[in-house]
Image (cartoon, grey):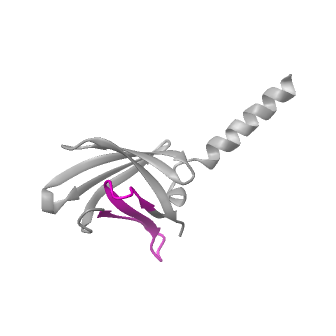
Amino acid sequence: MRNLFIITALALSLFSNAQKMSKKFLEGEWTSNGEATEILFSFTDKKEFLIQEISSTSGRPLDVISYEITKNTLYVRAYFEPNDFESITKFTILDKNTMAAHIVSDYPGYVIYKRTKNN
């Protein structure tokens, strides 16, 4: 019985670590399938982390003001000048290629993002 408990604990530990929010996990291209934005997470040659967010409808970039990874969540604060639209989006991992986004703004909502490409 004790061995079963240890194996279960180890398996749960491995699963939770595999799905941990990190810059490396985020790296790649993500899509909302036209519902909100397309996002590219990448690193510069100098290992700086970059977030490029593009409107799915207009193709225009949003200004990423700040971001923070806390525990297993990514928070992105962005501004879209053409509409004077500012938002804070809370991303959480659903699986290795899917994130849920809770958008807090004048137009709040929930959007699912899918990874389209790993870098």
Locate residue 106: give its quadrant: top left
Q: Is residue 113 visible?
A: yes
Residue drawn at (50%, 46%), measured in percent from left and top?
93
Percent position (x, y) of residue 80?
20, 59
Quadrant location of the N terminus? top right
Does the magenta stretch mainly form a helix, a strand or a loop?
strand
Frontmost residue, 44 versus 37: 37
Percent position (x, y) of residue 6?
80, 31
Farthest-out residue, bottom: 45
Locate residue 38: give its quadrant: bottom left
Frontmost residue, 20 versus 115: 115
Q: Is residue 10 above or below residue 112?
A: above
Magenta segment boundaries in residue numbering: 30-55
- Count of numbered circles in the view: 0
Percent position (x, y) of residue 69?
44, 49
Q: Is residue 54 magenta?
A: yes
Locate residue 64: give its quadrant: bottom left
Q: Is residue 91 above or below residue 25?
A: above
Frontmost residue, 9 versus 29: 29
Residue drawn at (49%, 59%), measured in percent from left and top?
115
Q: Is residue 46 magenta?
A: yes
Residue drawn at (52%, 49%), measured in percent from left and top?
21
Percent position (x, y) of residue 58?
23, 66
Q: Is residue 27 visible?
A: no
Farthest-out residue, top: 1
Tell whether 34 sits left or right of 44.
left
Tell whether 25 sits left or right of 31.
right
